[in-house]
Image: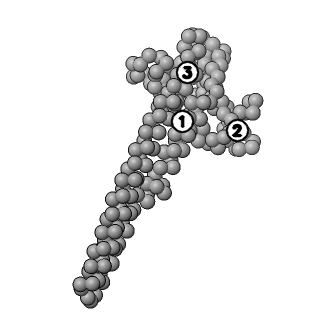
């Protein structure tokens, strides 16, 4: 598979623009290069080839999500019209499926975050209570060390929910938005003379 593009002067990216949209271009020698050869599903439900999917997703990542984009697939003029006509639907269906999968992943991650937060808060309050009991019953340096250790343990328990809510969820959401953009992106299949 040969992936091409000319440099854009404005963004210094390897993409041409046409009619106000940047072009993500793929030049293939055969329609089958676009799809996973091990997938036995009917044509309309086929999985994309891993390299093709990666190229499309990485190209969309190069742009702000509001930037108008168009996927252009160049095929030799010898390609059959039946396989060419279905390509946009196959790609849109595939990325619709990927967006739904990532939506479920995001939902699961946020649910895991809520559970971790509940556990962390309960444990933190238990540690604060234990610390207060230790300060009321024991005195001395050893008691202070245990008090601080218990308090630190309580705050460490808050690490996982904070990681989920501060860092883990937004890359998943970004990936979903990229898939949704590709699902809605116009796709052109252009036949070229193989010379």
In the picture shown, does residue 97 fall above or below 74? below
Residue at screen point 47% across, 39% down: 103
To which residue does mark 2 refer?
7
Sequence-wise first label, 2 or 3: 2
Please, what secondary structure does the residue beneath circle 2 have?
loop
Residue 89 has which mark?
Answer: 3
Residue at screen point 61% across, 16% down: 76
Residue at screen point 44% across, 16% down: 42
Q: Residues within 10 Å of mark 2 (few under 14, many from 20)?
A: few
Quarter of the N terminus within the rendering: top right
Q: Quadrant of residue 71?
A: top right
Q: Quadrant of residue 55?
A: top right
**Mark 2 or mark 3: which is in front?**
3
Q: How far is disc 3 from disc 1 in space, using C-alphas?
A: 14 Å
In the picture shown, does residue 77 fall above or below 176? above
Q: How far is disc 1 from disc 2 in space, using C-alphas?
A: 24 Å
Query: Left or right: 185 with respect to 130?
Result: right
Sequence-wise first label, 1 or 2: 2
Sequence-wise first label, 3 or 1: 3
One can see residue 5 in this view = no
Percent x, y for residue 9?
A: 75, 42
Q: Residues within 10 Å of mark 1 (few under 14, many from 20)?
A: many
To which residue does mark 1 refer?
179
């Amino acid at each position: 598979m040969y992936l091409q593009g000319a440099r854009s002067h404005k963004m210094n990216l390897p993409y041409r623009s046409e009619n106000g949209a940047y072009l993500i271009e793929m030049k293939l020698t055969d329609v089958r290069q676009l799809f996973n050869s091990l997938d036995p599903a009917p044509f309309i439900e086929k999985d994309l080839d891993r390299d093709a999917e990666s190229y499309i997703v990485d190209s969309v990542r190069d742009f702000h999500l509001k930037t108008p984009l168009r996927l252009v697939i160049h095929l030799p003029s010898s390609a059959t019209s039946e396989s060419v006509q279905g390509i946009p639907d196959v790609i849109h269906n595939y990325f619709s499926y990927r967006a739904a999968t990532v939506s479920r992943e995001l939902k699961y991650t946020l649910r895991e975050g809520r559970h971790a937060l509940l556990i962390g808060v309960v444990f933190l309050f238990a540690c604060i209570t234990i610390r207060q009991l230790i300060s009321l019953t024991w005195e001395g340096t050893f008691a202070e060390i245990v008090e601080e250790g218990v308090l630190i343990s309580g705050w460490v328990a808050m690490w996982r929910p904070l990681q989920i809510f501060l860092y883990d969820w937004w890359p998943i959401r970004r990936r979903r938005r990229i898939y949704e953009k590709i699902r809605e992106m116009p796709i052109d299949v252009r036949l070229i003379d193989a010379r």
